[in-house]
Amino acid sequence: LPCIATFVLDFSSFNFLFYSFIMGGDGGVVATNRRYLRGAGAADKVGNSTSGGSGDPADVQRNQERQAYEILTTCALTKHKLSTKDKIVACRYGRLYLKEAAIQALLERKANKSSPSNALDHVAKLSELYEVRGQFDDSKTDEIAFVCPVTAKPLQGKVPPAMLLVPGHPEQPNVVSAFAGDNLPPQEFQQEYGPIDMKIKLAPTPEELQKVKEELEQERAAKQEKKKKKKKDKRKLEAVEEEKKSEVETSQKKSKPTLNSEIKSRVESALESNPVLSSLYVDKKKK
């Protein structure tokens, strides 16, 4: 019996060591089919996606810069590369569009409510798109390359980011670096590049974009509430005016019989005071 127990124990130990060697000792199963091995090692590459999923700050920054560069050089609607000859507009999300393509998309959506969604779904009307006038790097002829007119530095999605001045001076570029926009004296900046009603950060980070979306939703909610209040006040004013009109008409109706009675009383009094008229009036009544 001791020999049998020793043999069983040794066999169990061998079995454990064998499966640990084959399977790694992690409680898994033996993969006998190659389809279970498809994609092996792919998890090691997930962090290299454009979202910066690796968690490495340097990778995250490089991915954001690459995405920002695409936004600053590509029409968000058609995905075509922008050129210095194109008429370009921007939205509050900091995206760029070919003006003609953007107008066409808005017209199609107005004509057909069931038109497919696109990059302009957040834009309600043409006035929510803003003209882009840039200063460009002439050495790059194959694609658009913004240059800050203040610092003369290229704006390629890197820090400092690009900023759109709305509406800006019609004869001056209105795309500058955020550094220049935040550090120049406001009066001097307005005089050179103004008037400035709004500053839109082009190609914002995901966090900045989320903040812009929330601000836009709040603005639209406030406008909608203001519009509702205006309609409500208009209906209230119309009701008051209608009530006043009704009161005037009622007053006029009541005053007419009183006026007629007063005139009749005056005529009768005149007849009674004049014997000739009174006799004629009485004779006629008798006849």
Image (spheres, helix red, strand yellow):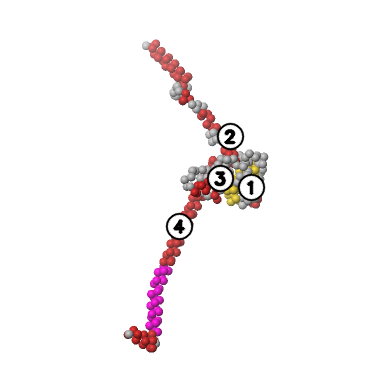
Tell me the element at label 1. loop
Earlier sequence position, callout 3 versus callout 2: 2
Q: Over which residues does the magenta segment extend?
A: 247-270
Label located before the other in sequence (4 or 3):
3
Q: Is residue 85 above or below residue 36?
A: below
Q: Compute the Cα span from label 3 to label 2.
A: 36 Å
| In the image, residue 61 above or below residue 279 | above
Q: Position of residue 149 (x, y in %)?
A: 66, 45
Residue of label 3: 101
Question: Left of 185 or right of it: where is 23?
Answer: left
| Mark in the foreground, 3 or 2 | 3
Q: Point out residue 125 in the picture as x, y percentages from the top left corner.
A: 53, 49
Q: Point out the frontmost of discs 3 and 1.
A: 3
Q: Is residue 122 magenta?
A: no
Q: How far apart in space, not on screen, are marks 3 and 1 (Cα)?
A: 22 Å
Quadrant assignment, res 60: top right
Query: How many residues crowd around disc 3 within 10 Å: few (fewer than 14), some, or many (20 or more)?
Result: some
Secondary structure of the residue carrying numbered label 2: helix
Please name the amino acid that badge 3 sits on.
Ala
* Among the 4 quarters of the image, the one containing residue 140: top right
Query: Is residue 271 visible from the viewing direction of this image?
Result: yes
At label 1, the amino acid type is Pro
**Residue 256 painted magenta:** yes
Helix, strand or loop for disc 4: helix
Of labels 4 and 2, the one closer to you: 4
| Residue identifier under label 4 | 232
* Residue beneath the point at 43% across and 62% down: 239
- How packed mark 4 is, by other alpha carbons closer than 10 Å (few <14, some 14-19, many 20 or more), is few
Q: Residue 58 bears which disc, if any?
A: 2
